Image (cartoon, helix red, strand yellow):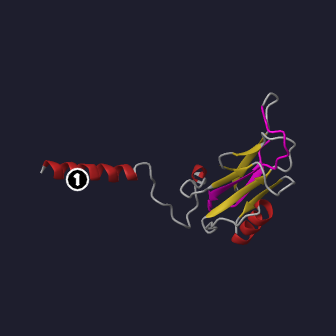
Amino acid sequence: MRTRLTWCAAAGLALLALGMGRKPPAKEDAKMTDLSQMTAVDVTPNAWTGAYCAATTPSAQLIEDEKSWAELWKQSLNKEAPAVDFGKFVAAAVFVGVRNTGGYGVDFLPPVSDGAAAVIGYTVRSPGKSSFVIQSFTQPYAIRLYRKPGTPVRLEEAK
């Protein structure tokens, strides 16, 4: 009896732990009111970064369909695009362009609302004056998936 009770208690605690911190799934057609939930944390991978790509000029793109996604990966990264459900997600892609050293990168900011749209901000990170960096040309980039919030989405550099 004691073993059975211990097993039942352990199973109950495991089920409770699995459910902790989870919110019920939102309705597919409902507008997202909490933009902090936009970042796609339940898909893997949900972000790609690197110091080398084929994009030599700075650009920022919001990708909302499979055709644009496939072109982005083929032209900028010389790879096949990973599968993404664009019915649920959008992708923000920022290419820094050619830099004469390493130490550059892209940081995405938490999405905010401007009243009419969800704004995904980003900053371009530069190496500090005393940073130890690779002495080679780089082409940094960052790509991140976000949940569709039900309102228009805009990608812009934070000043």
Residue that carries the numbered disc 1 in the rendered image: 8
Magenta stretch: includes residue 30: no
Answer left or right for 154 relative to 30: right
The answer to whether residue 114 is visible is no
Place of residue 91 in the rendered image (x, y in percent of width and height, measured from the top left): 68, 59
| Residue 51 sits above or below residue 31 on the image | above
Q: Quadrant of residue 109?
A: top right
Near mark 1 (Cα within 10 A), the count class, few <14, some 14-19 or many ≥20, is few
- Residue sitting at 28 percent across and 53 percent down? 11
| Local secondary structure at mark 1 | helix
Q: Please give the range of residues in magenta.
A: 132-159
Q: What's the residue type where badge 1 is placed? A: Cys
- Residue 116 appears in which quarter of the rendering? bottom right
| Relative to 48, 54 lies left or right | right
Q: Residue at x 75, y 44 (%)?
A: 105
Q: How many marks?
A: 1
The residue furthest bottom is 67
Q: Position of residue 55 (x, y in %)?
A: 83, 57
Residue furthest top in the image:
130
Asked whether 145 or 34 is in front, the reply is 145
Percent across and percent down for residue 46 are 61, 56
Residue at the left extreme, as displayed: 1
Given residues 62 and 99, the one toward you in this image is 99
- Does any portion of residue 158 appear in the rendered image? yes
Task: Please state the horizontal and vertical placement of residue 146, each as a whole percent of the image.
Answer: 63, 57
Q: Write the residue at 82% across / 29% down.
A: 129
